[in-house]
Amino acid sequence: MSDVVADAGAESVEVLRRVRTTEQEAEARLAKLKAEGAEARKRLEEEVRVALERARAEAEAARASAVAAARAQADAEADALLAEGQRAAAELRSRSSGGVAARRDEVLKVVLGPFREA
């Protein structure tokens, strides 16, 4: 009977050793997976950071381009309005100066007339 008890004890010890080995292997695999997960998270965070920086730079470039285009369009419209105003002013000057010059003597008589009679 002592041999049976000894064999049972030896088997129990062997079973416990296998359980312990399996636990250690599982813990090692778990630690490895955690490390791989942490590395993957770091990699993804870096990729996101780079993508955000790139997107910000692209957005800034697009904004600068849109502002430059709007400024150029506004300058062109302002130049066109100014040219139209100058053209209209020149036309008015040419019309009014010719009319006043031709009627100068009549205008002077009307304006200065009361003073000459006095």
Image (cartoon, rainbow, N blue to C red):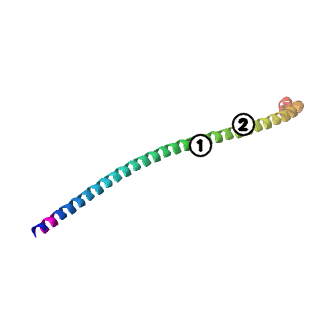
Amino acid found under the numbered disc labelled 2: Asp
* Position in image of residue 30 (x %, y %): 32, 55
Q: Main secondary structure of the magenta part?
A: helix
Using a 10 Å C-alpha cutoff, classify the residue at mark 1 as few (fewer than 14 neighbours), some (14 to 19) or many (20 or more): few
Q: Nearer the viewer, residue 85 or 72?
A: 72
Element assignment for label 1? helix
Q: What residue is shown at x 20% (from left), y 61% (from top)?
A: 14
The residue that disc 1 covers is 62
Mark 2 or 1: in front is: 1
- Residue 109, compared with residue 28, is above or below; it is above
Name the spot of residue 101 as percent of width and height, x first: 87, 30
List the single residue furthest toward the left. Answer: 2
- Amino acid carrying label 1: it is Ala
Name the N-terminal-most of marks 2 and 1.
Answer: 1
Q: Is residue 62 left or right of residue 15?
A: right
- Point out residue 99 in the picture as x, y percentages from the top left corner: 87, 34
The residue positioned farthest toward the bottom in the image shown: 1
Q: Nearer the viewer, residue 104 or 44?
A: 44
Which quadrant of the figure has residue 12? bottom left
> In which quadrant of the rendered view does residue 85 lie?
top right
Q: Is residue 108 above or below residue 16?
A: above
Residue ID for mark 2: 79
* Residue at figure coordinates x 85%, y 29% from the top left: 116
Q: Where does the magenta region start and end?
A: 4-9
* Residue 5 is inside the magenta segment: yes
